[in-house]
Image (cartoon, rainbow, N blue to C red):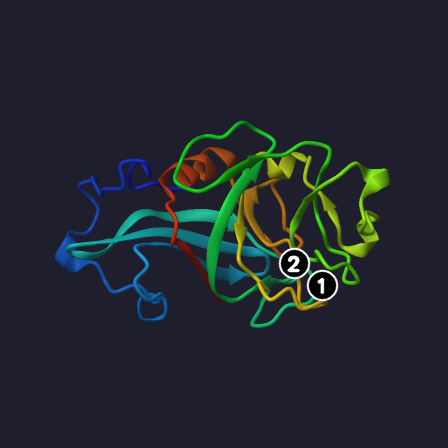
């Protein structure tokens, strides 16, 4: 079961059962995130499942904001380097660039785009806008909108809320795109990280520019 230690919006550890500030172990990603003060840790626990912990760094070091959040990852697990169509979640440290969703902006520090039927994530490897969000009528889009091309229409229930992971920011064709932290449909993903929507809304409200997501086995 998902267990939130505290309200993510408050960003403090309040339960009596939580460890004291001095007792918190240094998180595994600490030496890899530079000056970041907000990190979402996703660690695979086998197959297409993972556990998510949410961390914030302050004057007393890293403190857990939420722990043990159940998450779904790619149907084929994780990999250090992913490619289009592999159904694997990429491992590494990634930026969290902006949020979007079919629902209204829940608030928070990241840019938010409310999407509809004309919003796409371009997965066409021959397109100059590969691995970016685009807005166009289907018949007028300058890229291939067929799902077999890798392009996704963003007006789907799984994207009620989502945060863009900065994977393949160089947009190298074939090295994968459309990696998000998004609302779960209750099963494995095509490579994204998915959690229940209520928790995701709390996280989006808490996030600020400069936040990172760290993914590992």
**102 sits left or right of 118 in the view:** left
Q: Is residue 167 visible?
A: yes
Relative vertical location of residue 126 with respect to residue 192 in this rendering, above or below: below
Considering depth in this image, is 48 or 30 the residue closer to the camera?
A: 30
Residue found 70% across the figure and 64% down from its top: 86
Q: Quarter-wise, where is residue 150 in the image?
A: bottom right
Residue found 76% across the figure and 62% down from its top: 125
Q: Quarter-wise, where is residue 115 in the image?
A: top right
Task: Give x and y (percent) for residue 213.
Answer: 44, 57
Residue found 77% across the figure and 57% down from its top: 124
Query: Looking at this rendering, what residue extends furthest in the right direction?
Result: 139
Query: Looking at this rendering, what residue extends furthest in the top direction?
Result: 104
- Which circle marks residue 4 in the picture? none
Q: Is residue 41 visible?
A: no
Helix, strand or loop under label 1: loop
Helix, strand or loop under label 2: loop
- Which circle marks residue 84 in the picture? 1
Q: Quarter-wise, where is residue 32 in the image?
A: bottom left
Task: Give x and y (percent) for residue 87.
Answer: 68, 60
The answer to which of marks 1 and 2 sits earlier in the sequence is 1
**207 sits left or right of 37 in the view:** right
* Mark 1 in CB contact with mark 2 (< 8 angstroms): yes
Residue found 65% across the figure and 58% down from its top: 177
Relative vertical location of residue 159 with respect to residue 169 in this rendering, above or below: above
Crowd tier of the residue under label 2, counting other residues whose Cα lies within 10 Å: few below 14, some 14–19, many 20 or above = many
Crowd tier of the residue under label 1, counting other residues whose Cα lies within 10 Å: few below 14, some 14–19, many 20 or above = some
Instruction: Measure the alpha-carbon separation of dots 1 and 2.
Output: 7 Å
Considering depth in this image, is 170 or 69 the residue closer to the camera?
A: 170
- Which circle marks residue 177 in the picture? 2
């Amino acid at each position: 079961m998902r267990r939130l230690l505290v309200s993510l919006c408050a960003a403090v550890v309040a339960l009596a059962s939580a460890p004291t500030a001095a007792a918190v172990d240094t998180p595994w990603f600490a030496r890899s995130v530079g000056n970041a003060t907000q990190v979402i840790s996703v660690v695979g626990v086998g197959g297409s499942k993972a556990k998510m912990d949410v961390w914030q760094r302050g004057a007393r070091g890293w403190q857990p904001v939420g722990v043990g959040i159940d998450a779904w990852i790619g149907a084929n697990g994780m990999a250090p380097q992913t490619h289009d169509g592999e159904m694997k979640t990429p491992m590494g440290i990634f930026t969290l660039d902006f949020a979007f969703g079919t629902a209204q902006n829940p608030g928070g520090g990241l840019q938010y785009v409310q999407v509809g039927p004309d919003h796409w994530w371009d997965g066409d490897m021959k397109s100059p806008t590969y691995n970016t969000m685009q807005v166009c009528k289907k018949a007028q889009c300058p890229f291939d909108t067929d799902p077999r091309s890798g392009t996704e229409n963003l007006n789907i229930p799984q994207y009620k809320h989502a945060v863009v992971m900065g994977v393949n920011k160089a947009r190298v064709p074939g090295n994968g795109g459309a990696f998000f932290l998004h609302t779960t449909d209750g099963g494995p993903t095509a490579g994204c990280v998915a959690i229940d929507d209520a928790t995701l809304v709390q996280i989006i409200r808490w996030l600020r520019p400069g936040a990172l997501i760290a993914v590992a086995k």
